[in-house]
Image: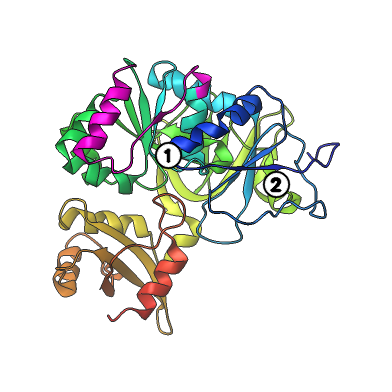
Amino acid sequence: MPGARCDRPHRLRMPAGADILEVLPALRTMLAGTGPLLVPVAPTDPADPYEATATPYLRDIPGVAVGTSGSTGTPKRAVLPTAALHASIEATHARLGGPAPWLLLLPGHHIAGLQVILRSLAAGEEPILAPAGLTTEAAITTLAGALARTPRWYTAVVPAQLPPLLEDPVAAATLRRCAAVLCGGAAVNADLRRRAEAAEIRLIATYGMSETAGGCVYDGTPLDGVTAEVTDGRIRLGGPTIAAGYLDDPARSAAVFTREPGGAAWFTTDDLGALDVYGRLSVHGRRDDVIITGGYKVHPAVVEAALAAILPTGTQVAVAGVPDPRWGHLVAAAVVLPQVHPEDLRQRLAQTLPRYAVPRRIAVVAALPLIGPGKVDRIALSALLAAADP
């Protein structure tokens, strides 16, 4: 659905800290349905890829073009019209209990952080800004002063942010006052959920992506107006929050975005999942993350959950396939924990996993490679594990 005009999208740098307030006027104008298409970028992004010679597609739609954080392929920008953003904001507030300001703990150029800002503006408020070093006593005291001005507020995080916050009593007490803490961008394992529940924090696991205006399935249940389907194991999402397509890329848009005769929009994800008898969605991981080893299919998320169950609370783990001439791929794991005995871990995993799913290689790493906020870069992880000393 290319527009009649070939406007040049407007790059919008999304600074960190209090400087984010500088972009609020442009975002308010966009939410009102006027102004150029905004392209939120990191404050350090030096490039301007939107020259007049580029293939014009979806450039004249008021809204935002948000970068995807998929771990494979060329980066894309999902064009979210203002109507899709409003639909997402309204459905989110309806699910959580009404409009309220949001505490910003995520980068504003990613969809999750951007939506924190937009939801606050839609509620007639500015986003609540967190001081640097949120787990320090001084930072929490400063934040408590800001939060005291509102009786109800929300926030959003990625799973990697939660463990240090839960370990700090003052930070955990602050989150306990939050009406809802959305957690998305990666899987929320059972251990992390148990710890949040023990701290009496209302944690809601969200599923969604830039193409769906952010999280659109909360704790397995789609937001009002959103539909989740699973076809041949692949998840499709439909409803008013779906993007119009990818900026300047009609071919890739046509491959995954469809619109039914009645006007319903659908996005076919690269994720695998299942619906239970109550219509609750469970996500098993990306199609291209599945490891085929010796003819067997292994979902990294299953192995990661098994590792998390036997490692100390909060240990970061990730699983990927490593090319192997005999088996096709080997199941390999990275663990951010100095004292690890791989053979002991393998023996314990063999008690709960099929033999073919037990990692043949377990490497200790200083940090997991990430793409986007809290999302593991599987390509970089595979290369890291292939080069690691087994």
Q: Residues within 10 Å of mark 2 (few under 14, many from 20)?
A: many
Q: Quadrant of the C terminus?
A: bottom left
Horizontal relation, residue 175 to residue 198: left or right = right
Q: Which structural element holds mark 1?
A: helix
Residue 309 location (% of width, % of height): 19, 53
Amino acid at pointer 1 = Gly
Coloring applied to the structure? rainbow
Q: Amino acid at mark 2?
A: Leu
Residue interval drawn in magenta: 121-149
Image side of residue 133 versus residue 186, left or right: left
Q: Is residue 337 left or right of residue 388?
A: left
Measuring 30% from the left and 67% from the top, which residue is drawn there?
Answer: 333
Write down the residue under mark 2.
247
Residue 292: % across, % down: 43, 69
The image shows residue 359, relative to residue 309, as above or below, that is below
Could you say which disc has been placed on residue 17 in the image?
1
